[in-house]
Image (cartoon, grey):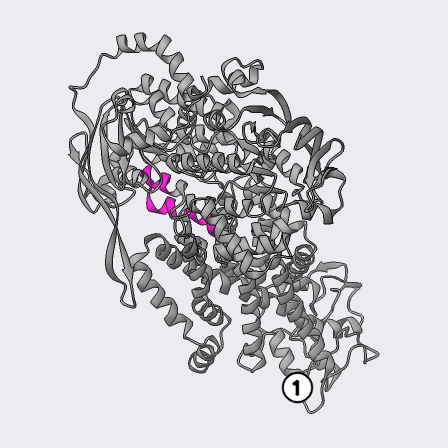
Amino acid sequence: MTESLATTKPASLAPRRSYSAQVLREVFLRWGARVGLAWILVLVGVSVFAPFIATSHPLLLSEGGRLSSPVLRHLTPADVTILAVFLAAVAVLFWRVAFRKRLAVVLGVLALSATLSYSLITPPSLVIFEQYREAEAAGQYDWVWRAPIPYSPKDYLRDFGDTGLEAPLESAERRHWLGTEENGADVLSRMIHASRIALAIGFIATGIALGIGVIIGGLMGYFSGIVDIIGMRLVEIFEAIPTLFLLLTFVAFFGRSLYMMMIIIGITSWSGYARYVRAEFLKLRQQDYVQAAIACGLPLRSILFRHMLPNGAAPILVAASFGVASAILAEATLSFLGLGLVDDPSWGQMLNQAVQSSTFNWWMAAFPGGAIFLTVFAYNLVGESLRDALDPHLKKNA
Amino acid sequence: MLLEVKNLQTHLRAGGETVKAVDDVSFHIERGETFCLVGESGSGKSVSALSVIQLLPRDISSHPGGEIWFEDRQPDGRIERVDMLRLSEERRRQIRGSRISMIFQEPMTSLNPVFTVGDQIVEALRLHRPEMGDAEARERAVAALAQVQIPKPEERFHEFPHRLSGGQRQRVMIAMAMACEPDLLIADEPTTALDVTVQAEILRLMRELQEKNGMGILFITHDFGVVAQMARRLAVMQLGKIVETGEVKKVLTEPQHPYTRQLIDALPENLRKRRASTVIESVAAVHPPRIAEAPLVELNDVRIHFPVRKGLMRRVVDHVRAVDGVTLSIPQGQVLALVGESGCGKTTLGRGILRLQDITSGSVRFEGEDITTLSPREMRPFRRRMQIIFQDPASSLNPRMTVAGALTEPMAVHGIGESLEERLHLAQQVLDQVQLPADSLWRYPHEFSGGQRQRIGIARALVLNPSFIVCDEVTSALDVSVQAEILQILLALKAERGLTLLFITHNIGVVEYLADTMAVMYQGRVVEYGPTEQVSNRPRDDYTRKLLAAVPRLDLVA
């Protein structure tokens, strides 16, 4: 009955689009996905160009007719690497070749730029943020082009005397759109630089979890039997580990490190993905095209990753987009508890400052909290649209 | 006239475009008569039936024109002629289920699994006969079950649907449809999902019930054999239009419209007649009988058992004996048909031969070598020479891979062709052989129709240049005309490449057309094995006889 409805449309009219292109189109027909993705893209842009958007160093200045750019001199190797990778990714986006080639190019640029920048670039170890403001006030420069937010995240405004918590736009001489924190640093600038940590921890921790989960879950689902039993016990062991307490313990023993945090969040949260992949593979294993691949004598790697994984990736992608959100929350929680990074800005750490002093500083709570909320919400929106686009049962009712 | 459909038009909207699913269709049904709508998938026969009972979703369907006049018998015996298209929803609901009933194709999904079958019949009764008491409704439901010849209806009343077999479920569906004593029964492919022996019983039951109650039946099917058994008049549909209508006997023997002729010619038994008259001599001359040659595949007492586990410790309490001691040999260059009903183990055996399924005991020899216990690595050289084609063209191709990818990957693994260009060229040649257009290489499976996908499946099996192919029900998901094309391609390929085929099917017509030898399987064992001619004409085994007798054939009318 439904079959005859479906086949009344001649097959030749069907668009020549690959399945993933169709799904992407479905996803972006939904408003939630558009809004969520727009916010994530804004975050990506802001975090990549953070050293140019919010910095105390002038972008360009002229001193006695000589042009110089202090901001370029103060770029760290990490800043350069991120910029190079971002440019490579954008360039590759318009290059019509297989996805695998594009990925290879981006990873190659990452390796190259990282080695080059860490070996060649040495920013001055002593940074004096106020030198340019003082020089400008003394009239040493012909003209100065400053960043939109002319304060670095660690610029505690020593030249303005004893600075501290200040509500947004409170001070007449300086413009702090979102106020300053307890040491006198600009809140907006800190938030912009903190978006890097939020994005990085979300993607890298989830990437680690996905990698482990797909491999273990895939093997469990494909082989079933004894492999499955052992794998499931492993999953249960890892599910029994409370991530937060493990992180607390590690921080206590090994000090604070962003990378350690990413790895720990990654290796404690793969079990969910492994369960999803296992279930999908158990189902796919009996599909005719997988049987046909076995009958053709294809190697196991190809059966698992070319024939089964792309067809079972849907629920994993959905889970991953929620996973990114929860990794960001985990980092924020740690920082809020005061166990995050010491000096580098982070949204959770800023939230912590909102309640530390005797008065409630609303701007310290509202803006970083809002950023966390929006980011987690954006990932959830994308995840939900992805799930709707991939779920045939929901689509029928839509 | 019980039902008179005049110039019916049904338009369906799907994704912004309107499809004329039914276009100017007229027919009528008398009381006590069976009228058949025949056509291939997509011809609009089901949509016509759903329009009559007004079950199409309102938001996607519309009727720009036409009338559906139905003689509505009131409870007091008055007869009123009503137009189903212009009735209020309230009146329609009263007619639906009580005056017009419908039974569907898939008995596995058309019963609600969380209610007992009795409850479901009682519910239908209470809805249309609100004056009926509980006890009376129960009595009527039991009587309805008895009427469809379900043994021990009193006990079956309390069974849940999953406890019944497919045939019994379809009987329950008929009982439900008949409970309110409708004047018109719409049967939408009611036996397509059933085995032939069960189909024969259901068809006999429907004829008996019709004689008893004198209702009209609108019977929808794609199977001319079933038409020949059931109906006196039929209409052939193509692309939403009725192209030919008339007496069954006349249409089947002297079809007027070219499409009807094409459909009837595509039936395997008619293909065989043509082949018998033209091809046999030449084939016999080129390939002298080679019975003496060494068999390509030999099975020796093959058993495939599935353990049944129970309890906390998952102890093995019993075995399902899917294949229970099969000894067969398939000679080089021949077609062996493996015939049997669903659940007889024929598919399991096919997969066992290819080692897609582990064999419990016994041995499989391929070209004299025992492959029963080879490791996957040792198996690889054999994989190239034995291939499989699957039943469902929708699920047998990886939806995320282009045809080129699906065809060249196995070649690369087995070292066929030096470069990608050469492999693509080879893939192109194989696509030519299965008669697919040249631009198919870079498309994805969802862009092809069922028959085209099945050809891609055949092409995938052929790229490795195998000597043995297991064809697992390759045509049962296809329309007759497409089936005819696929069968002809397979036969041509067999002659061209000297292929040996194991043809697994339940369709006796296909077997008689294609196979040199046939083996009949029943409950995991081969009950009869011999040349096709001999087995199908002079069956020795009781089960074979029963199976062959149940096959609906055209010559019944002649």
Does the segment drawn in magenta span residue A296?
A: yes
- At horizontal 16% and vertical 20% (from top left) the residue drawn is B293
Spot occupied by residue A122 in the image (x, y as percentages of width and height): 54, 64
- Above-or-below relation of B272 to A94: above
Spot occupied by residue A200 in the image (x, y as percentages of width and height): 55, 64
- At horizontal 42% and vertical 17% (from top left) the residue drawn is B270
- Using a 10 Å C-alpha cutoff, classify the residue at mark 1 as few (fewer than 14 neighbours), some (14 to 19) or many (20 or more): some
- At horizontal 29% and vertical 29% (from top left) the residue drawn is B545
Secondary structure mostly seen in magenta is: helix
Q: Badge 1 sits on which subunit?
A: A
Name the residue carrying label 1: A355
Element type at mark 1: helix
**Would you identify the image quadrant in which residue B235 lies?**
top right
Does the segment drawn in magenta span residue B269?
A: no
- Above-or-below relation of A140 to A101: below
Spot occupied by residue B424 in the image (x, y as percentages of width and height): 43, 27
Residues in magenta?
Answer: A291-312
Foreground of the two, A223 or B526? B526
